[in-house]
Amino acid sequence: MNHNKSRSLRFPKSRIALYLAKVTLVAAAYYLGGKIAVSLPGVELLGSSVWPPAGIAQAALLLLGISYWPGVALGAFFFDILGIKPSLILALQAAFGTTLQAVFAVALLRRLDFHNSLNRLKDVINFIIISAFISTQINSFLGPLRMYLGGLIQWSKYWEVRWQWFLGDAMGILVFTPLLLILFTLKPKIKYYRKSLIKSPEKWLMSSVLLIVLVVVSWIVFTAKTEAAISRYPLEYLPFPLIIWAAIQWGQSGAVFASFLVSCIAIWGAIDGGGPFIAKGANINQAILFLQAFLGVITVTSLLLAATVSERIATENLLRQNEIKYRELVESGNSIIVKLDTNGRITFFNEFAQKFFGFSEAEILGKSPVGTIIAQNETTEKNIVELLNNIRQHPELYQRNEYENIRRNGEKVWVSWSNQMLVDSEGNFIGIVAIGTDISDRRKAELAIQKLNEELEMRVAERTATLAATEAELRGLFAAMTDVILIVDRQGYMLKVVSTNPSLLIKPLSEQVGKTLHELLPKAQADICFTHVQTALATQTTVNFEYDLSINNQQVWFSANISPLSPEKVIWVARDMSDRKILEDKLRDSYAQLNTLLESMTDAILVIDSQANNIEVAPTNPQRLYAPDIDIISSTIEQFYGESAETFLSKIHQALAAKQTINFEYNLSINETEFWFFANIAPISEDSVIWVARDISDRKKAEAELRLEKERSEQLLLNILPEPIASRLKQNSSVIAESFNEVTIMFADLVGFTSLSTKLQPIELVNLLNQIFSTFDQLVEELGLEKIKTIGDAYMVAGGLPIPRVDHAEAIADLALNLLNIMQQFQLNLEEELQIRIGINTGIVVAGVIGKKKFIYDLWGDAVNVASRMESHGIPGYIQVTEATYQRLKHKYLFEKREEINVKGKGKMKTYFLIAKKAI
C-alpha cells in the first residue's frame, strides 16, 4: 500500500479531529465555568457576581482563533438547556448572544493589533474598553430580553437583571481572560524565570515572602466574619500595595496572578459570609456590587500598571542597546565623526577622525576646524559661521557635500560630509554633527577620467570635422550624379560622360565618348553649346544657359552650366528642367483662367498686409463687403471695420504666424442691413494675406429657421412620448416594445365630474379638467414618473419605465397621496362634491409604441388590467392597492386591510387602502 497516499488521506481527518477536540474543550470549559459560578451561595441561575464563562469565551477565541466560536456556542447552549432548562429557541438565542459578544470583542481587538501578552499599554486599554465595557453590552441586552420573552423574569426586573448581567460578564472578562492569556503565553518565559531565580536567590526569597504576605493579609481582610471587629473597618484595599509590588516585580504575569489570588480569596470570604463587603452591604445584592467594584478596581489598576512598567522596561532596554550600538559605531567605525557647537568649535572628534587627520582629542577639541582640518585663508573663518547659519535655515541643502580638507602634515584630502543639524528638547539649534568618508582616491580617479574625457572629446571633434567634410563632398557628388555631367575639350570632343539617368542621354554612353558636339547634337543646338564652351574657356568663368533636345520623341529641357576645369577643358553639368517648364506653362494658363474666374465671382477678395492696409482688391463683386462710396485702397482695417477691426487683425496675424489658412464667420451692418460672411484668410507672403469673403446671409437665416422648427418638433415629440422612446423612434421607425418585470401602475378617476359637467359650460369644464390634470402633470414630473395617457376624466401613470427604478412603488404611492390632497383643495375651491378614486397595482407589463400614425406610448398586460380594476372597484377618496403593491410598501406606509372583493376576470382578491406614509 502507498503510505504517502494513506497519510494524505488521513491528514485532513486528523486536522478535523483536532479542531473538534478543541471545540469540545472550549465548550466543556465554558459549561464547567458556568456551573461553578452559579453554585456560589446567594447567586441564582440568572447570573453571577463574577461570570467566568464570559472570560473563558474571549480567552479561547483570542488563543485559538475566531474559527473556534462553535465551542462557545455549544457551551452556552448546553449550560442553558441543562441548567435553566428553557425552550430550545431560548437556548439557541443564549448561544447566539454569548457567541456574538465574544466574536465581536476578539474581531475588534485583532483589528487593533492586540497582543495576548498584555505588555503594551494600548493593548490593556483596548482590552478594558472593548472587552469589558463595549462587547458586554451585547449579551447584557440580549440575555435579559431573552429571559423576559421566555417568561423567566418580569419586565419590571429587566434593567436590574441587565445591570447584574453586565457587571458579571465584565468582571468575568477582567479576572479570567488575562489569567488564561498569561497561563498559555507563559511557557516561553519559564526557562528565563528559572535562570533568574538561580542567579538571584534574593529575588526568589522576596517573591516567596510577597506571596505569603499577600495570602495572609487577603485572608485576614476578606474572611473576617461580620461579628468580628476587623470586618467593620475599610481594610479591603490593604492588599493593594502588595499587588502593585507584584506588578512591578514580575510584570503582567505577577499582576494577573496576584489580582486573581486576591479575587478568589475575596469571593470565598463573601461566600462564607465574611469580609468587609458583607459587613457593609445592606443586602446580598449590595454586597455583590461592592465586591464587583473592588475586583474591577484592582484588576484594571494592576493591568494598567504592569503594562506601563513593561513598556518602560522595554524602552529602557532598547535605549541601552541603541546606546551601546551607537558608541561602538562612533568609536570603532570607519567614518569620520565631528561635532561642532554654534560657534563653530569642535566638541567631538572620534578615534577614526583622530587617526585620519593626525590630531589627538586633546589637540583638536575646542578649536575651530579652520586651520586644523580646513585650509585657512581670509574668508574661511567667516565662511564657517555662514555655513552654520545656512545649515540652520536650509538643512536640506547641506545633507551631503564634498570638500577639500587638510591633514596635520599638510596633505590635502577630499572628504564627503553628511551634515545633520542638532537641536535641544525645545527645538533650539545647538550645533551640527558631520560624518565624513574619505573620497580622495575617487576624486583622483575622477580627475584622471575627466582629463582623459577631454582628450577624447578633442580627438572625437577632430575626427568628426574630417568626417563632416568628407560627407559634404560625398553629398555634393551624390547630388550632382542625378544630373548629366560631361567633360568637353576646346575642340568640342566628349572626353567623359557621367549620368545615373540614361534616359537623359541623347545616345548611349559608349557612343558619345570621343565624339564632337556637332556629331551628337542637331546643328543649331551644337553651335550654341560650342559657343558657350569657347566663352567659358576664354573668360574662365561659368556660363549658364538653357536648351532643349528631342530624346525618344519627347522634348526635354535642360538647365546647364559650363565651368572651366583647365585652360583646355570644361565641366558641363546639365539638369533636367522639363517638369519646371511644364509647370511654368500651366501656371501661365492657370493665371489667365484665374483672372477670368475672379471677374465672374461674386465673392469679395482682398489682399491685406500685416499692418492691416488694403493693398489690392480682386475684380469681383465687393459691394456686399462695403459701401460703394468707400475708397478701400486707402483705408485700413480700423477705419473700415470699426469695433470689429481688432478681431479681424488678430485673425490676420494668426494666419501669418501659423502659415496656414484660417476660416471663420462674421457679420457686418451695411446700409443698415445685417449681412453674414464666411471668410478664409490665407498667407501669400511673409507679411500679407488674401482675404476671401462670401455672403452667407441667406444660409444663416435658413439655418436659424430650421433650428427653431427642429426645436419645436423635438418639444412636441417629447410632450407625446418619453425621451428614450422618442430617441429610439427617431432612429428606427419600426415597432418599439419592451417587457418590464416590475412596474407600478396607477389609475385615477374623477368622481362627480359627470354631474359637474351639467352645471358648467363646456369651455369651463375643459378648463377645469386642464387645470386639474396640469397640476397632476407637474407632480408626475417632479417625482420622475411617466404619464401614460388621460381617458376622459381618468388619469394613468406608471413608475419604473421606460427607465427602471427600484423605488417605483414608493414614487407612485407618494403621487397617489398627493393627488388626494390636491383634489381636497380643488373641492374646497369649487364648493362642489368632486372626489378622486385611485387604484394601484405592481407587476409585469409590456410597454411600447405601435402603429404608423398618431404615436402614443402605452402599456399592456394583466398588471395594467388589475390596476384599472383597483380603480373601478375602489371607493371615492381612497387609494386601493393590490397584495403585490402592499408587500413592497408595507414597511414604509400605513395601510387599512379591506375585505376581499370580487374582481371581474380575477375572482376574489385581497386588497388594501393606502392611508399615509409612516413617520421616520
Image (cartoon, rainbow, N blue to C red):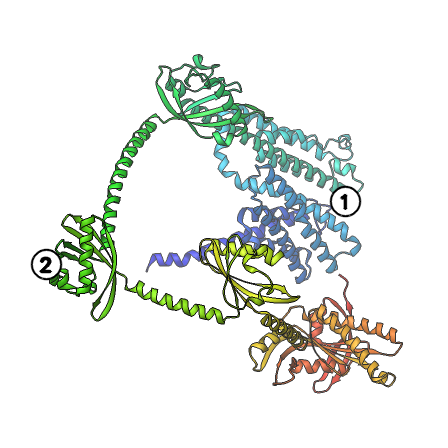
- When asked about the image quadrant of residue 468, the answer is top left
Residue furthest left in the image = 514
Q: Note whether 902 is above or below 267 in the view shown.
A: below
Most foreground residue, 811 or 541: 541
**Residue 610 appears in the picture as rendered:** yes
Element marked by disc 1? helix
908 sits left or right of 564 in the view: right
Quadrant occupied by the C terminus: bottom right
193 sits left or right of 853 in the view: left
- When asked about the image quadrant of residue 170, the answer is top right
Residue that appears at 23% across and 51% down: 542
- Looking at the rendered structure, which numbered label has been put on residue 514? 2
Mark 2, Cα crowd under 10 Å, few <14 / some 14-19 / many 20+, is few
Residue at numbered disc 1: 285
Q: Measured from the top left, where is residue 48 in percent x and y?
A: 70, 47
Residue furthest bottom in the image = 905
Q: Measured from the top left, where is residue 164 in percent x and y?
A: 73, 47
Q: Measured from the top left, where is residue 807 in percent x and y?
A: 67, 68
Distance in Å between CA atoms under marks 2 and 1:
140 Å
Q: What residue type is labelled 2?
A: Gly
Q: Which amino acid does label 1 sit on?
A: Asn
Element marked by disc 2? loop
